[in-house]
Image (tube, rainbow, N blue to C red):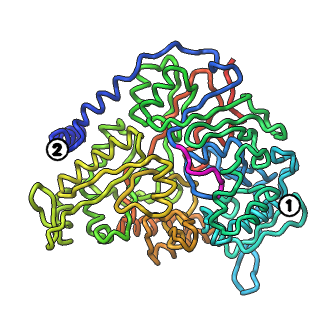
Amino acid sequence: MVAKADYFLGRFRQGPGQVPGIGLAIALALLGLAAGPASASGPRVPGQMVIGLSQSPANMHPAIEPHTSKALLLDFALRRLTVNDPDFKVVCQLCVEVPTIANGLARIIDRPDGTKGMAVTYNLRPDSFWADGTRVTSADVIFSFEAGKRADMGFQRPDVYAVIDRVEAPDPLRAVVFLKSIQSNFNALDWPILPAHIERETIKNSADPADFRKNTLYNRAPATPGLWNGPYRMTASEPGVSYTFEPNTFWKGKAPAFKKIIVRVIENTSALEQNLMSGDVDYIFGELGLSLDQAISLEARAADRFDFVYNPALTYEHVDINLDNPILKDVRIRRALLAGLDREAINNRLFKGKQPVAATFVSPKHSGFDANIPVAPYDPVLAGRLLDEAGWKMGAGGIRVNAEGKRLQIELMTTAGNKQRELVQTVLQSQWKQIGVDIVIRNEPARVMLGRSLRERKFPGMVMYSWSSLPDEPPSQTLASSSIPTEANNFGGSNYPGWSNAEFDSAIADAAHELDDGKRRAIWSRMQRIYASELPVLPLYFRAEPFVFPKWLKGIRPTGNQIPSTAWVEDWYVAQ
């Protein structure tokens, strides 16, 4: 496979009109900076930590637009009912005990229409407070559901709110969530709990629901204490530049170790590395910071200053396809594009074999992973045959044309400034050029691409980025027909390709409703087969997240799932 990679890289260097030499790009990445003086005892400013982040969220509201950059920030200061911990187990944050059928807090019920539903009881922690001293109560849970179920609010998880019938509050510290059907992840539904005493007024004062995104204090005044209920609260923010967190004085859990945490946004990953080496930032988020190739290079140069962990994750890097594009709507084109990619060469040459090629959206770490579904091999001959069948014949200059003489040209976008993605992007461009596809690169800053182009489906061709997931969560958020963003739902949902497949929708529903592990695995296998055949999204590889810790920083546990490591920030500390 190394020989194949060398062949492919050689072809890339010779490609006309391409970015000069992947070999040069890698060589430059390996040069790096000379290591500055090590700080063995702690951060530059005692009691304060500065963290680097490679992307900035488009907004800060917990229920609008699901991005890793936002989750990393929010989880310093917000707690959910339950989360999946680094061992993938469901654990409580705002509740006292995880509801299960065995402990009686979850039970199957008969609904008035004769169908089966569930009643899931959450006993809330009596010591949870918003940072203005207001207790977190069942009123917050009810309000969060009532706001989320409105189709015009544009909240990110319409799939979750749709399965909930109602929420009742027998008392201030008990909330009962009634589900419309049996749900396999009944105690791990991912919906944020919002402060009713603040957000209710914001909604009331937003005459047009579309205005809520602008009016919410999470965006307009995020330093408002009552927005936060975690160990920290946000005390200052300059969107796209920096975010500051200080301890929540009403937090009753384990006391956080830092008096101040400052997160600096540095969207160019080369500059991010320079700031780490110079000491201007103490730590870089492993989930969204240095690229894998940067971390591997840095380990060779600075192992005396940092500890390195390469954490396999459920996160998969992929290429979203706009299925409204008449060219990409043809499944033969999508299959040809995948067959024209030598993903194994990319993994071995750029990532030292640490990022396994993805067969579908389901990671080998997932309980429903089907190892019998093969990874589509690199097969440029098959790619050419499929393109011929679709009516695209090889033309002048090595670019295919159709019967009308139109060139086979497709736009590919990714997050500007992410060195690794931009490098991979040029490799994809080169490989697709070899099968006669002209790829036009147009990149945007993460805030623009994730906040507008994807959310409003304004990308004309393809977009490369990553998705993370919870361990046993059906892909209703990203691949269900009901999650296609539209003006009618205020661009809620995250099915950005616009894929609608009745069989897959049925499988999502079946997976969500099935409690038997064996039957649920069979359903997950069915979803993977449909996905591998239809290819609404081109899978690239599953990411290994590189965590680079200064020697003095302890207590951070990478999760490998959608819940970021900041969800346990109270466990972080400076080694003595």
Magenta stretch: includes residue 61? yes
* Whole-percent x, y for residue 551 in the image: 58, 21
Nearer-the-camera pick, 337 or 119: 337
Q: In this view, does 168 lie above or below 264?
A: below
Q: Is residue 339 above or below residue 571?
A: below
Is 178 situated left or right of 310 in this image? Answer: right
The residue type indicated by label 1 comes to Arg
Q: Residue at x 31, y 27 (%)?
A: 28
Tag 1 residue: 174
Is 429 situated left or right of 112 in this image? Answer: left
Q: Residue at x 54, y 66 (%)?
A: 491
**For numbered disc 2, what is the local secondary structure?**
loop
Tag 2 residue: 15
Residue 311 visible in the current orientation: no
Q: In this view, does 41 lie above or below 100?
A: above
Residue 317 visible in the current orientation: yes
Give the magenta part as a residue range.
Answer: 56-63
Check the image and name the residue furthest to the left: 396
Quadrant of the rendered image containing residue 535: bottom left
The residue type indicated by label 2 comes to Gly
Q: Which residue is drawn at 49% across and 42% down?
A: 312
**For numbered disc 1, what is the local secondary structure?**
strand
Estimate how packed mark 2 is, as few (under 14), some (14 to 19) or many (20 or more) residues with alpha carbons within 10 Å: some
2 and 1 marks in contact (CB < 8 Å):
no
* Whole-percent x, y for residue 216 in the image: 69, 56
* Whole-percent x, y for residue 53 in the image: 54, 37
Quarter holding the N terminus is top left
Q: Is the magenta stretch mostly helix, strand or loop?
A: loop
